[in-house]
Image (spheres, grey):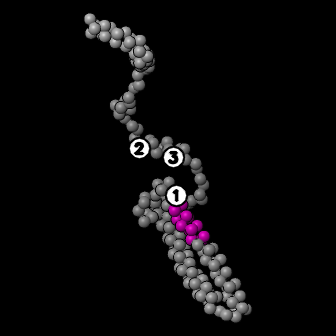
Amino acid sequence: MRILGLFLLVGFLLSQSPLVELSKKEKERRRRIKTTKVITNADLGKAPRPSVITKRAKSFLPRVSGGESEGEKSPKKKREWWISRKRKLEEKIASLKRKIQELQQKVNSLSTNFLIEQRPIAQQKVKSALEKAKGQLEAAKRELAQAKKALDKLYEEARKAGIPPGWLR
């Protein structure tokens, strides 16, 4: 008798539980929700040929009149043009690095002379030369940074133009 009463009590409590009600509501909600469709490769079908894609993509690119003649549009001259631009930038970067090294040596020398010099007038001349050299050094460093950015911009421009990476190596 006790066991039967206990089962009835538990059954009554479970039927009144808020969790049971929430569970029923959740099941009802899930039934009402539309099922989602999973898209597979079979649903996509065949992709268009690459030539179709490139023709469409070219139509969206802005047209720039770069003043290129027919000779520059040929692959051989175009390659030479890209290579020459790269070489010019690399030569500029190399010359700026040499210039920076020379200016750094000059600044170091003038700094030493400034500390060694005892006469005020001579020390003032060394100080003005030192400040001038420091200004030139900073300008050369800024110019080097700009040249490196220009080289990076050239690489990016070549990539966007579809130039083979081997041309600029």
Labelled pair 1, 3 in contact (Cβ < 8 Å): no
Q: Secondary structure at mark 2?
A: helix
N-term mark: 1 or 2: 2
Which residue appears at 35% of the width and 10% of the height?
A: 9
- Magenta range: 142-154
Q: Quadrant of residue 135?
A: bottom right
Residue that carries the numbered disc 3 in the rendered image: 58
Q: Quadrant of residue 20?
A: top left
Characterize the local packing of mark 2: few (<14), some (14-19) or many (20 or more) Cα atoms within 10 angstroms.
Answer: few
Which residue appears at 41% of the width and 15% of the height?
A: 17
Q: Mark 2 belongs to which amino acid?
A: Pro
Direction from residue 21 to residue 64 in the image, left or right = right
Direction from residue 117 to residue 92 in the image, left or right = left
Q: Is residue 128 above or below residue 51?
A: below
Q: Which quadrant, please, contains the C terminus? A: bottom left
Q: Secondary structure at mark 3?
A: helix
Q: Secondary structure at mark 1?
A: helix
Q: Residue furthest front?
A: 2
